[in-house]
Amino acid sequence: MTYCLGILLPSGLVMASDSRSNAGVDQIARVHKMALIEQPGSRVIAILSAGNLATTQSVVTRLKEATGSGDLTHDLYTARSMFEVADMVGNKLREVIAHDGGFVQPYGDPSASFLVGGQIFGEAPRLFEIYSAGNFVEASERSNFLQIGETKYGKPILDRALTAQTPLDDAAKLALLSFDATIRSNLSVGLPIDIFRYETNSFSTANFATLEDHNAYWRNLRQGYSEGLSALVAQLPAAPQVWEQPGA
Amino acid sequence: MTYCLGILLPSGLVMASDSRSNAGVDQIARVHKMALIEQPGSRVIAILSAGNLATTQSVVTRLKEATGSGDLTHDLYTARSMFEVADMVGNKLREVIAHDGGFVQPYGDPSASFLVGGQIFGEAPRLFEIYSAGNFVEASERSNFLQIGETKYGKPILDRALTAQTPLDDAAKLALLSFDATIRSNLSVGLPIDIFRYETNSFSTANFATLEDHNAYWRNLRQGYSEGLSALVAQLPAAPQVWEQPGA
């Protein structure tokens, strides 16, 4: 399983992915699920992957190899908008599935999905989710985070706390709390976490980090949250022995 | 969708279910998903249902009608243990599916699952989950809660806070917080919540309640939790602008 999260804010993007790949519990590996593609000063693109690892690696590798080729259908450097980037990712996914899907099917599910976030000079940062079918949806201020993979455990904290006004560094904190909830409840999502904070108009991939278990901020965050939550729950009153009567 | 939860503790059981039934978003109804079967002083059985409503109602109604019949394979009053009760529910489910499944299949999924909790004089309270296949698993002190339906949103709070030492009234509080998380994140799980607290050796169904939105405890609980959680998250430090270097 996988957990990838993208958050879109006026101040920028937070993109985060876990690193566990497994084909059954006895075959577990650490992989990269986030690819960054950059033209300093003009474009930054983050592609986060879930699903069949051979499929996602094939899509990302082929797209990376095509950068600078001038091929208007596959060269991410030629895309004039993040919408075109999302379209190229979806089309490449369809090509890979058309090429490999029939051979893979007898052994397992060849499908994959992606989060694609970034900024191209001339437009604001944008965030897309590319479905297994190759079509895609875009985040907006009304729906400002997208998730792929094991999405449910980490959703409540975002539903409660993330708003369009959340500062970028607080959004990064919420992203990590969302990963904490997921990692606690699903063994197949695992450290390290790759996290990329992109500040609007920075056109820089500098604020990327890989958080291992021993990272001090990560450890303090999850410990502080866990202790604070236990204290909060303990302090809320227990259920009454006698319930309020309906209509009372 | 549905959310049903059963918690097994030395001090008793907490069983809770939501009330929303839907066949598409334009056909929504309130239904009972918890049935209580009681022989004062000797047995208390709670059956919680998820899945196809016609299937679950057929299973529960037929089992209720068979009580007192003396039929050793279907009369819950004759079951000598909660294991036998779980077996009867699983067998009845297979009968109903054998009878109706083929007719229902062209229109939708006929399958169902159940939580069965209770106590029969002579043994401790027990809790089971009956799968769609009619087989079942039992909760224990190592795995002291079981869920059916929309299980994921409400699992993190239980993973974090529920222990074998949790008092029954605190377990009821945790159950309601688990429902709060689920209801916030999934529209197809809805109020009222039926909640039944069973105290070991009481052989009583007296502590059953239906919580509507205006129930004072429920309102205060979810408001207190929401405000406390917001304050906790706000008080945790934002992600650092510069990440700790690996190995530093």
Image (cartoon, coloured by chain):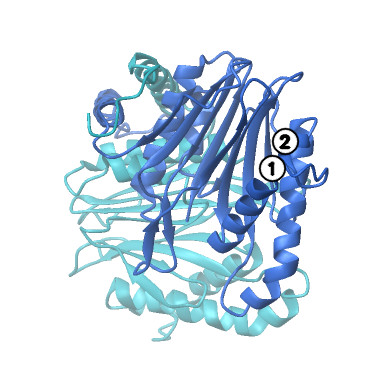
Chain colours: A blue, B cyan
> Label 1, on which residue?
A67
Instruction: Classify A7 as above or below A56.
Output: above
- The residue shown at (62%, 85%) is B98
> Label 2, on which residue?
A77
Residue A95 in percent (x, y) is at 75, 60
- Quick one: SS at disc 2? helix
Instruction: Classify B140 as above or below B157.
Output: below
Q: Residue furthest front?
A: A69
Which residue is at the front of the view, A114 or B229? A114
- Quick one: SS at disc 1? loop
Residue A245 in percent (x, y) is at 45, 31
Q: Give the letter of the chain under mark 1.
A: A
- The residue shown at (19%, 68%) is B123
Instruction: Classify A55 as above or below A161.
Output: below
User: Badge 2: how crowded within 10 Å, few (<14), some, or many (20+)?
Assistant: many
Label at residue A85: none
Which residue is at the front of the view, A64 or B123? A64
The image shows a total of numbered marks equal to: 2
The first of marks 1 and 2 along the sequence is 1
Residue B24 in percent (x, y) is at 75, 51
- The residue shown at (74%, 38%) is A85
Q: CA distance from mark 1 to mark 2?
A: 6 Å
Left or right: B69, with B143 as reference point: right
Residue type at mark 2 is Tyr
User: Badge 1: how crowded within 10 Å, few (<14), some, or many (20+)?
Assistant: some
**Are the two marked residues, 1 and 2, in contact with CB atoms closer than 8 angstroms?**
yes
Residue type at mark 1 is Thr
Q: Give the letter of the chain under mark 2.
A: A
Quarter holding residue B53: bottom right
